[in-house]
Image (cartoon, rainbow, N blue to C red):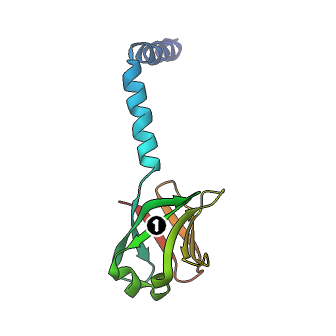
Amino acid sequence: MKTMTSLLLVGALAGASFAIWPEDRVSEAGKAVAEKGRLSRYRLIVSGRDESCLVEKGVETGLNAAELKAEEGCYRLLPRLADARIWKRDDEGDVVFAAADGREIARFFAADGVAFESVKPASPLMLLTAE
């Protein structure tokens, strides 16, 4: 009986919190989630390296594509990134670093909602974590 009373009380409190939550606060929360989805600065971590560097999704250049900006240190971590100029998102949500000619340099998938993990190149493993 105590358990049933507790469950009813918790349900009533939860319902009351939705009823008294101002509509503008709900839209503010929605905006914050939307902004988080548009993060543009990430830390690039390469497995086996002590250093890391910042990469940034720059100005939008077209459908699901933007300019890719990287710190100079990124090229020391992984020299093949020197050719990467474009940040793309594909239909599955993968992040692709591409050369100016469209050639794929690196591909990352959404690993846990916070970080992206590389699938190309297969080695070394790379992570992109939100800054």
Q: Is residue 43 left or right of residue 62?
A: left
In terms of image quadrants, where is residue 53? bottom left
> Which residue is depicted at the point 38% across and 87% down?
76
> Which residue is depicted at the point 58% across and 80% down?
121
- Residue 86 is situated, as x and y percent measured from the top left of the image, at 51, 70
> Which residue is depicted at the point 41% across and 58% down?
40
- Residue 102 is situated, as x and y percent measured from the top left of the image, at 61, 75
Q: Is residue 14 left or right of residue 98?
A: left
Q: Nearer the viewer, residue 21 or 54?
A: 54
The residue furthest front is 61
Count of residue discs: 1
- Residue 10 is situated, as x and y percent measured from the top left of the image, at 46, 18
Image: 35 above or below 108 = above
Badge 1: few (under 14), some or many (20 or more) residues near its Cα, within 10 Å?
Answer: many
> Which residue is depicted at the point 47% across and 12% down?
12
Q: Amino acid at mark 1?
A: Glu
Q: Nearer the viewer, residue 54 or 122?
A: 54
Secondary structure of the residue carrying tag 1 is strand
Image: 80 above or below 45 = below
- Visible residue check, residue 50: no
- Visible residue check, residue 97: yes
Residue under label 1 = 67
Q: Is residue 17 left or right of residue 1?
A: left
Q: Nearer the viewer, residue 117 or 15?
A: 117
- Residue 63 is situated, as x and y percent measured from the top left of the image, at 59, 57
